[in-house]
Image (spheres, rainbow, N blue to C red):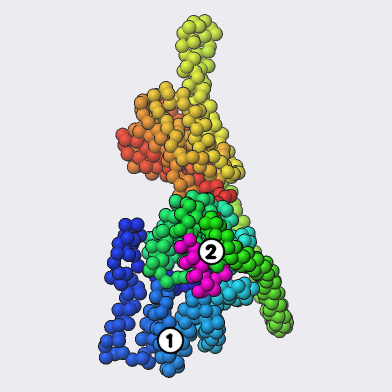
Amino acid sequence: MSQKLQNPGIKTFVGKITIFTLILLFSFPLKAQVSKRDSLAFRYKRLHTTNRFDTKDTTHINLMIDLAKSYRFFNNDSVAKLSNRALKFSQSVGYQHGEIMALENLGSYYSDQGNRKKSMPLFKQALELSIKTGDKECELNIINSLSNDYYYEGNVAEALNLYLKGIDVAKQVGSNQMLSILNENIATLYADQKDFANAEIYYDTVQSLNRELGNEVIHAETQSNMASMYKDAKNFDHAMFNINKSIASFEKHKIYEWLAYAYQVKGSIYLEQKKYQWALYWFDQSNLLHLELDDDREKIQLLNGMAKVYLGLGKDSLSMAYAKEGLQLSKNIKSLQGQMECSETLYKLYKNEEDTQTALIHLENFKSLSDSLFRDKNRQSLSMLKTKLQYEQEKEQLIKSNKMALAKQQNYIYLAITILLVLSVITFMVRRNARIQKKLNVELHQKSEVVSQRETELHEINRTKTKLFSIIGHDLRGPIGAMQAMLKLFTDGEIGKDEFMSFIPKFKSDIENISFTLNNLLSWGQTQLNGVATKPKRISLDKLVNSNIQLLSEVASGKSIKVINQLPENPMGWADQNHMDIVIRNLLSNAIKFTPENGLITIEAEEKRNVWQIMIRDTGIGMNKEIQKKIFTDSTNITTYGTNNERGTGLGLSLCKEMILKNKGEIWVESVLRKGTTFFFTVPKAEDKYQRAS
């Protein structure tokens, strides 16, 4: 089996997370460390040594069951001993919940031994009792455990059928955790059949549920299984990404039963790529943990993996030892998959030793098991399809029956509604005149509000018109008039060509300022008169910043100001490109305007949850708290002079604010006098079409 089936409530282990402390872990007894299992064992022992011990006490029975469950994968003999005692005590006092839990623990014990003749009747007995008593939580856990047992037996159709029924029960009781586990186990079925497309569909559901649960450990378990799936699909990049994430979480939370599995998966990823030394390293880490685990099913995968690694490294004697141990363990728990894989490895080893007779025995065993499993997998795939179709048909039939019953009820409802309608018509006729009068009053009130609103709009338009003409008269007419006067002096011969040419740089600067002012003026006027029409799309913020740095480079160079783009590689935003271009140009122009010579301006970006936060920092003159409060106010038109007496219209920041808000962002400023200013604004992030592959 390539993946680990999920079981709720069995993941407890103690230890440290570094290699050094793993060595310490096996140098000293585990019982010297503090854990949930140790705590349960201490409480159980203390209860037995006091006068309060009573075998009929349900608290004592529950403690015994919890302790038995905590020993799974660590000391299976204790699982059986404690569960049998709990079952006996529960039956003696009629404690049905304890009886169900004890039966489930015993079923898990025999299932782990590969003895499904004993495990399945126990699971079925527990399931029947949980349904009878209405214990939905136990019912869900047992459905999952019994489904896993059917899968280990090779009855994939029955396993899938039970998983699907478990999903319905989990939806009824609103258990997202069990929904996650059941969907993940279905994904495992499909992955084992090499149906990776269907497996990924179920994993999408699992990941969505895990996000709602917000449990890092559960998410890590899913990632480790997804890593195994991606490894089988030869998608090693995705496999490595997921297994590294899961290992970090298991080490952080000390979940060593799953950590052993995760180490083994990481080793198998390297093995598939023939990176034997790396594979051996991770298999060794898994093997260290398995020394304190009692989980034969997962250990088979590890043993065969180590045998393949040593075979690849040319260390046949070590490979032979691990392969033989894996084969024997596979026979003990009746794992046909394990027997097949270990037989294949042994065939290659005996072939290397030129022991053709023994090699032939293992080859025949491998081929026999391989053919059998191949036929079984084909039958299983067909069975899974039939099971799913049958399940969907039964579900559809149930929905039809419910609809018919609902339709019958609706007929009675319609009759009652008809009677009510007749009474309503009579009531309506009585109240009709009052309603008409009320409606007329409402319409009159609404029309009054419309007139008042239009009056306000007209006042605002007049205010906008006045501001436009004021700006045109002051900020455009002045520079243009100066240029006109200079041209007249030249054409009249009052100044010479050389003197006139000396004013060319001044003319160029004035024209650039007029052009910049005119662009802002037109954009602002359009927003005031017609509103801002946004056309968002995917835009490269880095390209916009670079183009504006280049556009204003001459102005910056004139003041020996260094402008640095520190944006990360290709941040993509979702906004109107023209609007963002105007915002960046205005903020960068302001920074140059208020930064003295030899200053520094940096443009940075920080990735937040759903947005990019852009920061434009300068080492300029800064501003006081009062100006900071006013600069984004619509009713304020602050115009200030730069360090070289540069003058603006005062529209830039107002325009920036409108365009940022229309693009679903925010803008604010932080400044310290004589130290500098930082303008912040946010831009929504563009959706990542390849988010799954990240």
| Marking on residue 84 | 1
| Coordinates of residue 499 in the picture (x, y in percent) | 46, 8
| Coordinates of residue 215 in the picture (x, y in percent) | 45, 65
Few, some or many C-alpha atoms within 10 Å of disc 1 (few <14, some 14-19, many ≥20)?
A: some
Front one among 657 and 90: 90
Q: Secondary structure at mark 1?
A: helix
Specify whether 268 is left or right of 529: left
Front one among 539 and 20: 20
Q: Is residue 329 magenta?
A: yes
What distance separates the C-alpha of mark 2 from that of mark 1? 35 Å
**Residue 75 sits in quarter:** bottom left
Few, some or many C-alpha atoms within 10 Å of disc 2 (few <14, some 14-19, many ≥20)?
A: many
Front one among 403 and 242: 242
| Marking on residue 103 | none
Which residues, given as a range, are shown in magenta? Answer: 320-338
Specify whether 208 is left or right of 606: right
Residue 568, compared with residue 93, is above or below; it is above
In this rendering, the label closer to the viewer, 2 or 1:
2
Residue 40, compared with residue 483, is above or below; it is below
Magenta span: predominant SS is helix
Q: Amino acid at mark 2?
A: Cys
Q: Where is mark 2, residue-wise? A: 342
Number of numbered discs on residues: 2
